[in-house]
Amino acid sequence: MRSVLPVIAGLLLGCSGTLPAPAAPRTLTDPTPAVLALADSILGAAGDRDAERFASYFSDQPGFRYLINARQLESREALRTTFAAMLGRQEFFRPTWQSKSVQVLTPATAILTGTFATQARRLNGEDWTANGVVTFVAVKEADGWRVVNWHTSE
């Protein structure tokens, strides 16, 4: 004897005789690769001494914070201006990641922690190096991933 339950269920659901196939489970995109790429792009722009591109990876939303060795900048424009002045005093500037890891908070929010090393030469020929740690919060905005909070200590 054939069961009538599928037919009854189908009629209740507006189908003809069979239940609809279950929907495929929704998968959320892991933001880790995008956040790691953002981190690489930021250091790449700094290494190219391109303050405009460097600043473009940071949010221009209210609440933005950039902290470097106890100095706080509160806008993308302040960041761009400060870095343009600093990078303009360098003959070369090569920051590299020594380590980095991402902690995903939501599909649109993540924290990156990492260590970096910088080799540079000022316009006067003086070589200098710096090693430090970075923590930043990245969010996915309408036009891509942006940093909303950055902290660096050397």
Image (tube, rainbow, N blue to C red):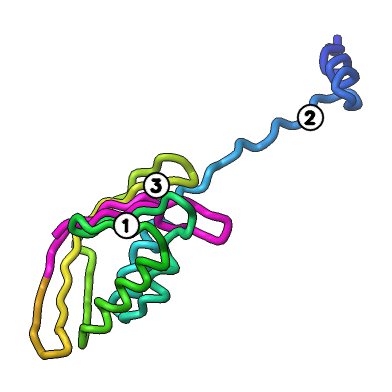
Report the residue marked by disc 1: 66
Characterize the local packing of mark 2: few (<14), some (14-19) or many (20 or more) Cα atoms within 10 angstroms.
Answer: few
Return the disc, 2 or 1, that comes first in the chain's sequence: 2
Return the disc, 2 or 3, that comes first in the chain's sequence: 2
Tag 1 and tag 3, C-beta contact below 8 Å: no
Image quadrant in which the N terminus is located: top right
- Residue 8, placed above or below residue 73: above
What span is colored magenta in the figure? 130-154
Q: Of helix, strand and loop, which one carries label 3? A: strand
- Residue 119, placed above or below residue 146: below
Residue 82 falls within the magenta-colored stretch = no
Asked which quadrant contains residue 58, the reply is: bottom left
Q: For the point 47% across and 60% down, which residue is it? A: 60
Q: How far apart, in angstroms, are the residues tagged by discs 2 and 1?
A: 52 Å
Q: Is residue 106 left or right of residue 82?
A: right
Image quadrant in which the C terminus is located: bottom left
Q: Of helix, strand and loop, which one carries label 1? A: strand
Tag 1: amino acid: Tyr
Task: Please state which of residues 96 and 13 is positioned toward the viewer in this rendering.
Answer: 96
Q: For the point 17% across and 89% down, which residue is it? A: 123
Going by the picture, which residue comes out furthest to the bottom? Answer: 124
Task: Please state which of residues 2 and 37 is positioned toward the viewer in this rendering.
Answer: 37
Report the residue marked by disc 2: 20
Q: For the point 35% across and 66% down, which residue is it? A: 79
